[in-house]
């Protein structure tokens, strides 16, 4: 319970106690606060207000509340939080600070008693003790709640096979609009066996499994029999091979994630999610490199500068998601800078080519990739908005959901990029034929 799930449970308990205590103390508004305690009281109210603004329908609302609590306390307690590194570490410190503030409020009630406000103070303390006692009891139950929930889900899966969304432990809940058909497996082997059984992951698993076969067919049959292949140098074939490898690796990582995301182990879920992310990063980098290679086919210096930069960022995109420090809240700027840099390696060549050639020539060169980009963009839009299941919850549990459509879009984007890559190479070969040295 020391991980993020434990923090979320502790935070929920703290916020529940905070709401009840503040409601009671506010009913005794005639009790003036010392200046020493008023700042703490204002902070507690700010935490309550900002956390209540986090929608419960927002995916990852628990983590958002952690961030809200940290952000609220950081302005007034910067020194206390500065030593903490990750969001989870800062959240632990923040929860301890809030506990301390609540204790200060109870101490204030004791001072009221000493000043003669005995009845009010005793009432306040009785209520506080009752809330604390209830909180301790809930904390004892919560300490085992995740493991208990996992065991109940396993037992229910044994009995009924597939689960409903509300039967899943919290870390396994990702899309509230997909209501039925969830697997929940005790072991990794059980996850693998389930790929042949009917579930709401069946389409996700097999769409990219079949997609992998299609991409392999293109790589080992259609591409080698194409006209461009016969004109290609070893370097040309290597660049195409990098793209095919990245595409296959992305599809394999996706299949692994959707096969294993039902395993009853929180740490393994996070690991397999990182597998999926790294596959996407590698595909993005490889796709950009094919355009850089062919766009600067006659300009070796620019070509290799762009390609090496993209390759290094691509390797970073494979490694960094596995590093806890990179995923910390205080590293948000670094993550933004990284992905902006990776994207920029695909757009900066357009600027250079516009200056060295002409906008018309740039448009002519990049037009073939428009289909691939459009399919990726529309797929990402559908995936992020959870359409169409958002409109009709339960109707698209097994087929036709946003993630199914995203998988089709990824496969379509890969195949469209292959056809665009063929056009890119044809353009490059024409330039070379007109007297340009490729190397």
Image: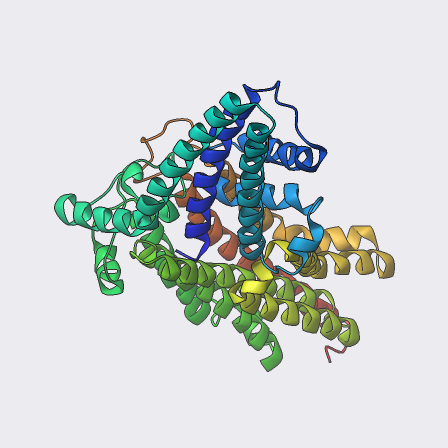
Could you say which is closer to the camera, residue 141 or residue 199? 141
Measured from the top left, where is residue 367 in percent x and y? 67, 50
Picture layout, residue 152 above or below residue 306: above
Task: Write the residue at 59% across / 41% down.
Answer: 68
- Residue 162 visible in the current orientation: yes
Task: Write the residue at 59% across / 71% down.
Answer: 315
- Residue 59 visible in the current orientation: no
Measured from the top left, where is residue 12 in percent x and y? 45, 40
Could you say which is closer to the camera, residue 271 or residue 105? 105
Task: Write the residue at 68% across / 36% down.
Answer: 39
Task: Write the residue at 40% across / 40% down.
Answer: 175
Dividing the picture into quadrants, the one containing residue 13 is top left
73 left or right of 400 in image? right
198 left or right of 287 in image? left
254 left or right of 425 in image? left
Measured from the top left, where is residue 316 in percent x and y? 60, 68
Could you say which is closer to the camera, residue 391 or residue 303? 391
């Amino acid at each position: 319970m020391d991980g993020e799930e434990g923090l979320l449970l502790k935070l929920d308990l703290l916020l529940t106690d905070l709401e009840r205590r503040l409601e009671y103390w506010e009913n005794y508004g005639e009790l003036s606060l010392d200046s020493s305690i008023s700042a703490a009281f204002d902070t507690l109210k700010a935490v309550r207000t900002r956390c209540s603004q986090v929608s419960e329908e927002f995916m990852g609302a628990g983590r958002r509340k952690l961030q809200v609590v940290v952000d609220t306390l950081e302005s007034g307690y910067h020194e206390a939080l500065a030593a903490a590194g990750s969001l989870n570490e800062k959240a632990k410190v923040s929860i301890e600070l809030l506990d301390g503030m609540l204790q200060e409020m109870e101490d204030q009630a004791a001072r009221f008693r000493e000043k003669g406000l005995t009845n009010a103070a005793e009432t306040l303390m009785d209520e506080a003790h009752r809330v604390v006692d209830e909180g301790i009891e809930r904390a004892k139950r919560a300490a085992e709640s995740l493991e208990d929930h996992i065991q109940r889900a396993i037992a229910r899966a044994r009995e009924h096979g597939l689960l409903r969304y509300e039967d899943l432990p919290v870390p396994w809940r990702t899309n509230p609009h997909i209501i039925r058909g969830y697997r929940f497996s005790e072991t990794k082997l059980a996850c693998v066996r389930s790929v042949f059984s009917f579930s709401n992951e069946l389409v996700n698993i097999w769409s990219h499994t079949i997609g992998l076969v299609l991409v392999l067919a293109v790589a080992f049959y259609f591409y080698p029999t194409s006209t461009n292949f016969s004109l290609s140098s070893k370097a040309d074939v290597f660049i195409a091979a990098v793209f095919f490898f990245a595409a296959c690796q992305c599809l394999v990582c996706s299949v692994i994630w959707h096969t294993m995301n039902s395993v009853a182990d929180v740490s393994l879920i996070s690991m397999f999610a990182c597998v999926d992310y790294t596959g996407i990063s590698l595909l993005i980098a490889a796709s950009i490199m094919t355009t850089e290679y062919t766009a600067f086919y006659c300009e070796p210096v620019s070509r290799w500068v762009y390609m090496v930069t993209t390759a290094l960022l691509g390797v970073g995109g494979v490694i960094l998601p596995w590093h806890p420090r990179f995923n910390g809240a205080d590293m948000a700027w670094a993550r933004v800078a990284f992905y902006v840099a990776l994207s920029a390696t695909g757009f900066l060549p357009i600027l250079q080519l516009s200056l060295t050639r002409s906008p018309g020539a740039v448009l002519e060169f990049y037009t073939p990739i428009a289909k691939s980009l459009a399919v990726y963009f529309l797929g990402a839009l559908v995936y992020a908005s959870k359409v169409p299941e958002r409109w009709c919850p339960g109707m698209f549990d097994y087929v036709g959901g946003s993630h199914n459509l995203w998988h089709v879009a990824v496969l379509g984007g890969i195949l469209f990029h292959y056809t665009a890559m063929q056009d890119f190479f044809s353009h490059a070969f024409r330039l070379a034929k007109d007297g340009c040295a490729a190397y």
